[in-house]
Amino acid sequence: MAEPLKGSVLLVDDDPAVAKVLGALLGQAGLSVHTASRGDEALALLGRKPIDVVVSDVRMPGMSGLELLAEVGRSWPDLPVILLTAHGTVPLAVEAMKAGATDFALKPFDREEILFSIRKALLRAQQPEASRPPVGKDAGSFVGRSSAMSSVQALLARAAAGTATVLLRGESGTGKELAAKAVHDASPRHAGPFVKLHCAALPDTLLESELFGYEKGAFTGAATRKPGRVELAHGGTLFLDEIGDITPQVQVKLLRLLQEREFERLGGTQTLKVDVRFVAATHRDLETLVREGTFREDLFYRLNVVPVWLPPLRARPEDIEPLARHFLDVHARANGRPAFTLTPEGLATLCAQPWPGNVRQLQNFIERLVVLSDGPLLTGDEVRRELERQPGIIPLLPAPALTPVPGGPTAAPGASEGRTLESQRKETERQALVDALKSAGDNRTLAARLLGISRRTLYNKLEEYGLV
């Protein structure tokens, strides 16, 4: 007998009969069920109650299911949404997946099918926040003025023009999903679907069914044939996030897909051909995994055709200011707050922090500031207060003193002299160079990759800081 489900589901359907039957089914499965008959009613309920999964009809009066999906994505980007439709065609599935739906199910729904989809969605919703993929267009990873990110954007633009597989590498939170979307949007396939699959979120059996799809009767709960993400991405781009976490069993099947562009659905015998451009991402050290025998060497070479390293935020501290201002604007509007302004001391305190979670961590911190601060000025004291509330996550570093400007505000009492924002930036940049060289065993080509800059830029920086 299947293990009872745990979680809270919001069911949105204008048909009272469907809402009653499906609500009873989900309640019997152990779920807490809330219902709404309209999109605006659903949004109001989401603002009041903690919800783990949204299940919504596509065709409703007023706000459609796809429009509700877009609104949920803007305000609750990590909340899974499953769409129900009596018109379940592959084009509609593609549209739903492109819009960010976690899954779709057909009416009249099958009990095992809908519970199977909700179980997958709950697995995603219950992931620790730090392991989730970065949010969409407002992630802001390409906001900034650093030479490191300029080099990355130029490399992505060159890669987008071709069809070769792109492997995005870098620490968690550096914006790999945003980079994958940038490759798709600048490619000749930009009019096709951009389909995402987070490989670390699902166990093997669910990952294979999500990737390749399945035939009716392939397993318990497979009440109808269902296309996988590979099939849905035909003519477009498939983004495989956290590719370093897949097991050897899935690696074998993925290798064949990359080599031959063909696959079979689970439980099927028909070989299907697809026209798909692959972009993969990982924060794992794949070379070490290959040496340890846990990641196939042939698959690594198939993936690593065009490698792109995304630099950590500590390697581009000059981007902290524009990112912080961008996130202040985004989250003030999202939370219905007036515009916020960082004081020089507040900005200096932000720029002094290491941000081990990179852009995603900075974004989450700025959103917390927006929600908890009175505003409109965010001072150094307010920034430090919020940093101190999570001492185990961000080791609080003192902000550099600000150089007094004639006729302007004086530095904070007790601040040490000579620690300008520019000197702090240079010190951080120099340390990033030293760390990269050490990690790369003094291999400058690899160090440049780790930092996400060109070799020429690396040599210029080494000369600038006397590290030649």
Image (cartoon, rainbow, N blue to C red):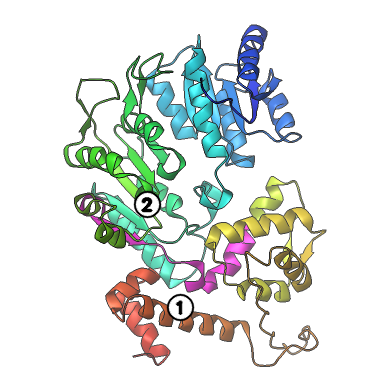
Precedes in sequence: disc 2 or disc 1: 2
In the picture, which quadrant includes the C terminus? bottom left
Query: SS class of the residue under badge 1?
Result: helix
- Residue 459 is situated, as x and y percent measured from the top left of the image, at 33, 83
- Residue count near mark 1 (Cα–Cα under 10 Å), binned few <14, some 14–19, many ≥20: some
Question: Residue drawn 24% across and 37% down?
Answer: 253
Q: Residue furthest right?
A: 374
Name the residue nearer the viewer: 304 or 154: 304
Whether 52 is drawn above or below 442: the answer is above
Query: SS class of the residue under badge 2?
Result: strand
Q: Is residue 287 visible?
A: yes
- Residue 281 is situated, as x and y percent measured from the top left of the image, at 37, 52
In the drawing, what numbered circle is on residue 281? 2
Q: In this picture, which residue range is highlighted in magenta? A: 301-328
Question: Residue drawn 44% across and 34% down?
Answer: 98
Question: Does the segment drawn in magenta span residue 304?
Answer: yes
**How far is the residue under mark 2 from the one under mark 1?**
23 Å
Q: Are marks 2 and 1 in contact (CB under 8 Å)?
A: no
Left or right: 57, with 149 as reference point? right
The residue beneath circle 1 is 432
- Residue 51 is situated, as x and y percent measured from the top left of the image, at 67, 33
The amino acid type of the residue labelled 1 equals Ala
Tell me the quarter of the picture where residue 42 sits.
top right
Left or right: 44, with 193 as reference point? right
The amino acid type of the residue labelled 2 equals Ala
- Residue count near mark 2 (Cα–Cα under 10 Å), binned few <14, some 14–19, many ≥20: many
Tell me the quarter of the picture where residue 25 sits.
top right
Question: Does the segment drawn in magenta span residue 205?
Answer: no
Q: Is residue 328 visible?
A: no
